[in-house]
Image: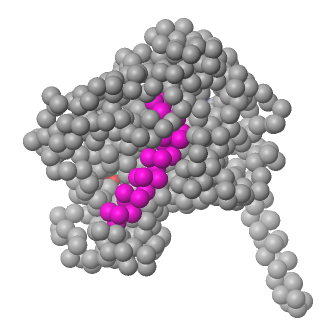
Amino acid sequence: MTSTKLLQRIAAVATLAIILLLFSLLHSEKVEWLPLPEALSRGGDNELSRLHLLVVATASNLNLCRLVLSGTVLNYPPPILIDWEGEGIYNASESHLAKITGPLRYLEELSPSKDDDLVLMVDGYDVIFQFGPDVLLERYFSALSASEARLKGQLGAEFVQQHNVHNTIVFGPDKTCFPLDHQHPRCWAIPSSPLPGDAFGPETDHDMEHHRPRWVNSGTIIGPVADMRELFRATWSKVEKTFDPENGSRNSDQMYFADVFADQEYVRTLVRYGEAGLPPKEEKTRPDLGDGHPTEFHIGLDYDSRMFQTCAGYEGFLSWTHFDQPAPFTDLETPTSQEIILQKDVLASQKPFAAIIDDKTLRDRPWTDVSLGVNVVTGFAFPLLHFTSDKSLRDKWWPQMWFFPQLKRLMLAASKKRNDKIGSQKINGVRWQKDMPYESKKTGGEANTGAWSDKGERLSWDLLCKEHEETLFNG
Ligand SMILES: *[C@@H]1O[C@H](CO)[C@@H](O)[C@H](O)[C@H]1NC(C)=O
Ligand SMILES: *[C@@H]1O[C@H](CO)[C@@H](O)[C@H](O)[C@H]1NC(C)=O
């Protein structure tokens, strides 16, 4: 290295140090982010992938405990409570923008060896699980291949490859655009639903209830760490560029995610088809892409709720049923309704009560012998239920979940047996395991219950949920 180059390098390092110092001074009144413990930086192993479960929750309550408990009995990774006791820009009860800053902070801190891991991120107070992470992962990869086939069909295989157009991040689906503004790109510049034109019967798309979902819901998102980090960075930058203190929706994280999705879809169409592929400028507003920022974030939607079942406009199309008799839905007037059979991935997963080893009759009961929630339009028994509209359904449907009658025994069984593996075989060619981010090797079975804060604090089940046990176990 010549001496001029060396001097240049020293100057560059010094400048960076000064910037970092200024930055930390500017932010010194904010809550300190504790670096993640060593345990995080295990070396990468291509034969093994991890799933992280991030839950946005500033404090505990009954609804958070429902999520944590259903995740515990179904063997999900220990939840990381993002924005836990968060202050300022990390206080999600003050502003939903903390649903962008909190996860971003976590993603920025993860070691690069975790870039290929998957992150499942969900709202804290209106989500519960019905099936385990093995079923969810199977559905995730099937959703990706369905979207790849669609993209190739719509845009052409060559185009898709040339422009690196593919989906790796999947959002839950909504039946309405929020905030609603028919001229705005977030409401029009997005793909139409791949569900059949009569999916919701003759009234399909005529009103909210019968609308085929095609807008993002930001309460459930899954994707690879590296892609999620890029998406959250871009979404935060969208906030910085477009935040309007006068706007009633200014604190809606969903609006900014929807705007980023719209940019992506607008550009995908524009580059492929030019102006001819777009509605006239006089009718629809175009996104502002002024500074030429990247727009491809690999965002897709779970159109058929094979993973994420939202409730808004869906109450009339969800049913609880046993799959022990054929054709349970012949009375419904939807095209897929004649033959709903339980998906193979559910049948292949561990039997519902298998963990209760001291009760032979119970542990041998198959999935076809418990009541399961199913989307009668798409035919999927869903891994996750998201109460997006009527919040009273959280109380009403909890006792209908298959695990409810045996919850106490299931929780006890889960707390005794430690199992870091997800499922019993490879999914998408890889063995999956739960990410155990802050855990020391010593922490025993009790690490299977409770949660962790995003600052690395262990939050025990008793601390979080003891006071809600009566309602959780008895309805
Ligand atoms: C977060 O915001 C809520 C509502 O403004 C407030 O009551 C609470 O004290 C805040 N939490 C923290 C930790 O600052
Ligand atoms: C402000 O709110 C309206 C809807 O109420 C929305 O369409 C618009 O995009 C918002 N603008 C910004 C910059 O947040």
Res. 174 visible in picture: yes
Residue 293 place in picture, x, y as percent: 47, 70
99 sits to left or right of 310: right
Q: Which residue lies most toward the right here?
A: 3
- Residue closer to the observer: 127 or 264: 127
Q: Which residues are magenta?
A: 125-151
Q: Is residue 130 magenta?
A: yes
Residue 104 place in picture, x, y as percent: 59, 50
Q: Residue at x 58, y 49 (%)?
A: 426
Residue 114 place in picture, x, y as percent: 67, 55
Residue 303 place in picture, x, y as percent: 33, 48
Please identify the quadrant where the N terminus is shown: bottom right
391 sits to left or right of 177: right
Q: Which residue lies most toward the left here?
A: 202
- Residue closer to the observer: 415 or 97: 415
Chief secondary structure of the magenta span?
Answer: helix
Q: Is residue 60 above or below residue 434?
A: above
